Amino acid sequence: MRVIDGDSLEVEGVGEVRLIGVDTPELYHPLKPVQYYAREASEFVKNLVGGSRVRLEYDRERVDKYGRTLAYVYLEDGRSLNEEIIRNGYGFALLRFPFKHLVRYRQLEAQAREKGLGLWRDQGLAEFDWILGQKTIPYEIFEMANNWWGIRYREYVRLRLTTDELGPELVNLRQWTSEFSPADLEKTLLANGWLKLNR
């Protein structure tokens, strides 16, 4: 077994396994820099799993759109790896899709946040300080004439957004950069009013 990152494992005889209901910071993403606490999350999982055997349990959906097996992973001592990651602040509860432990994972995340563990340290200021230290801001927001806003993401810009449009556009950008390959991301951005800079 090999740990890929904080929420993915390579399990012999199964292939790549994506932990259900857990989202850890990106360590290996083609469009994103390494995110805050990504290395720590990966190391935490390596230390828990080590070379030991794990048991997989499935929910309604067994495979995601990328062909990865979706599973709850249980350690030899019976603890849930998914829960341990969230409980200790190494990942977030991924609540966008229904799954049987959704309420429990939401509670574990709230407890980690209240205790200021891991990702929740200093109410998020630790992450902000880390981002500033990296000197790599993923996107820039700028004010334009006539109360318009613009967003720059790498070599792409989205211009003349109203204040009401700015927030939803940032949500879209975050989702697209998480889910699409570079080629699909470019197509999606251009189809949704983004421009590619030729400079």
Image: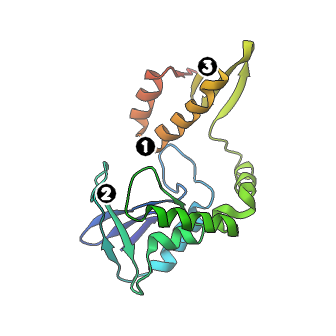
Residue 45, given in percent of the width and then of the height, sits at: 49, 72
Vertical relation: 12 (above or below) 50: above
Looking at the rendered structure, the secondary structure element under dot 3 is: strand
Position of the N terminus by quadrant: bottom left
Type of amino acid under label 1: Glu
Q: Is residue 163 left or right of residue 158?
A: right
Picture quadrant where residue 13 is located: bottom left
Residue at point 41% right, 27% down?
187
Residue 179 marker: 1
Q: Are marks 2 and 1 in contact (CB under 8 Å)?
A: no
Q: Are marks 2 and 3 in contact (CB under 8 Å)?
A: no
Question: CA separation, marks 2 and 1?
Answer: 14 Å
Q: Is residue 14 left or right of residue 114?
A: left
Q: How is the image coloured?
A: rainbow
Residue 16, given in percent of the width and then of the height, sits at: 33, 62
Type of amino acid under label 3: Leu
Residue at point 55% right, 37% down?
171
Q: How many numbered marks does the figure carry? A: 3
Q: Is residue 6 visible?
A: no
Q: Nearer the viewer, residue 2 or 20?
A: 20
Q: Name the residue tied to disc 3.
A: 159
Vertical relation: 170 (above or below) 60: above
Residue 68 marker: 2
Residue farthest to the left, as pictured: 13
Residue 109, given in percent of the width and then of the height, sits at: 57, 64
Type of amino acid under label 2: Arg
